[in-house]
Image (cartoon, helix red, strand yellow):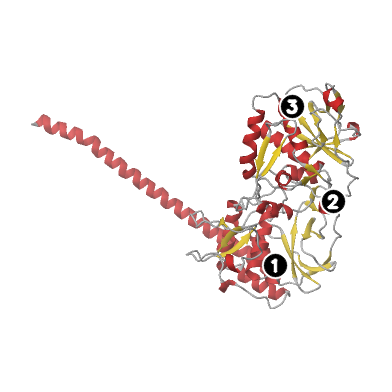
Amino acid sequence: MLRKVFFIACFSLPLCCCVIAQESYEEYLKARKSEYSSYKKKAQEDFAAYRAKVNAEYTRFMRERWKAFSGEEPIPAPEQEPPVPPTVAPQEEQDRPAVDRPVIIDKIIEKPLAPISVPQPVVQIDKEPQPLPVVPTTPRKENFPEDKQPKPSSDTRFAFSFYGTECRVQLDREQKFTLKNSQEDAVADIWEQLCSDNYTDMVADCLRLKKELDLCDWAYLKMAETLGNAFLGKESDEATLLQAFILNQSGYRIRLARGNDSHLYLLIASDYTIYGKRFFLLDNSRFYLLRAYEGNTMHIFDRKFPNDCALSLAVENTPRFSSEMSDVRTLAAKKYPEVTVTVSTNRNLMDFLSDYPSSAVDNDESTKWSTFADIPLSPENRERLYPALQKAIAGKSEQDAANMLINFVQTAFVYEYDDKVWGGDRIFAADETLYYPYSDCEDRAILFTRLVRDLMGLETALVYYPGHLAAAVRFNENIPGDYFVIGDKRYLVCDPTYIGANIGRTMQGMNNNEAQVILLDR
């Protein structure tokens, strides 16, 4: 009997220890969770206090007299050399083996980097799950037509259409406001109202949409503009003030201005040169006026907001707009029948790219091409186009694969001059070349470098001759032909507008000794 009791006691001891250990661990977790909750609450309180302080100070200065400034004349886009017409490579040249003809490049053009800074919003995004703010909708409209109003739902947030994408933010009719006038005190009174907690969720929703839709800075600016116009009236002073508030609270460097017409205008800083737009030099930055304005002087509230940053025009990811797909288009390489593909492009993305401004970095004209060349291809076209092209070039040498891709770009598209189609120069991102019926040399060079980077993983460059744009590729194979020597790297000439020519051939009349080589990002 004693042995049995001893056995039970020994057996029970580990069980008791386990229970005690488990209870201790649970208590430890509760304590840590409580500590984290306290820390989180304290951090939120500190952030709210900081936000209230900087907003109160900013609003106080807004009441002071705004100074008059004279604007700078818009910088026009550089004049283009007369375009070189597309050329068909003579058959004898197509048949003749390529011969190495190197050109050493001492001066290369790498895309200058505009100072990169991440906006620091003074509104925090709640990380708790929220209702999805984006649902498929109709093609882009300024406002919902009467027969396309959002269907009633439990979601009472304000709905607006942004490039065909229905978006919702925390706003209701009671939050609409009217400016008494555009004078300092009247503007500051409304700004103070906007800084209250009533509008915090609205800004948080805008920031959440920016993340969920993968919006670049320019797209976010356009979204704030669209929201303001939809909620308060197109280009009204109230809409301008709401847009300025959203961008300011989201961390962007803006200025409010009052024109000679007594209307409010938004100025936004950018380290890019935005062609064709008037700007004001304030605090060593260019502040661009993106709306039309009759006049040269403005009264500007020239006060810096803590930790704000300039607007970037880089597009690192394709915005995730709702799909409004174009008709399917079939494209085929003349020399390689197996390279036949179908594409369909999101019209909402085309609308966005149509609104995208022509710009340059550090006043470097060449960056107007590299900015568009570095815009990624949309997921919709990647899913349709890339599997077919990957299948066609699978198992091929780099030379054969590149010859197939360049013939595809040379022969699948109809060439036309921008002046005839658009009335002036217009640069396409890769998606636009797949969508529009006509393209020119710069569009083809951009598309070709996009395909080579994505499908072959090779480094590429654009090659500028007066009146013409071609490409160059750094192959791993030693492929014969015309090439540029850049440091210890060899970039082979590839011309998507020299019809029928293989890689390594320079278009007739082009002088590689006078060419400018513009390196692109991978």
Q: Residue 475's mark? A: 3
Q: Can the viewer see residue 283 in this picture? A: no
The quadrant holding residue 308 is bottom right
Residues tagged 2 and 1 counted as in contact (Cβ below 8 A): no
Horizontally, is 33 left or right of 447 in the view? left
Dot 3, crowdedness within 10 Å: few (<14), some or many (≥20)? some
Residue tagged 1: 240
Q: Earlier in the sequence, mark 2 or mark 1?
A: 1
The quadrant holding residue 231 is bottom right
Q: Can the viewer see residue 426 in this picture? A: yes
The amino acid type, in three-letter code, at marker 2 is Lys
Q: Residue placed at 81% from the left, 53% from the top?
A: 422
Residue tagged 2: 420
Q: Earlier in the sequence, mark 3 or mark 2?
A: 2
Q: Nearer the viewer, mark 2 or mark 1?
A: 2
Secondary structure under badge 1?
Answer: helix
Residues tagged 3 and 1 counted as in contact (Cβ below 8 A): no
Dot 1, crowdedness within 10 Å: few (<14), some or many (≥20)? many
Q: CA distance from mark 3 to mark 1?
A: 51 Å
What percent of the width, then of the height, locates residue 513? Answer: 90, 31
The quadrant holding residue 473 is top right
Q: Outermost residue, bottom direction?
A: 180
Q: CA distance from mark 3 to mark 2?
A: 36 Å
What percent of the width, then of the height, locates residue 512? Answer: 88, 32
The amino acid type, in three-letter code, at marker 3 is Phe
What percent of the width, then of the height, locates residue 48? Answer: 56, 61
Q: Earlier in the sequence, mark 3 or mark 1?
A: 1
Secondary structure under badge 3?
Answer: loop
Dot 2, crowdedness within 10 Å: few (<14), some or many (≥20)? few
Quick one: 46 or 469, which is closer to the camera? 469
Q: CA distance from mark 2 to mark 1?
A: 36 Å
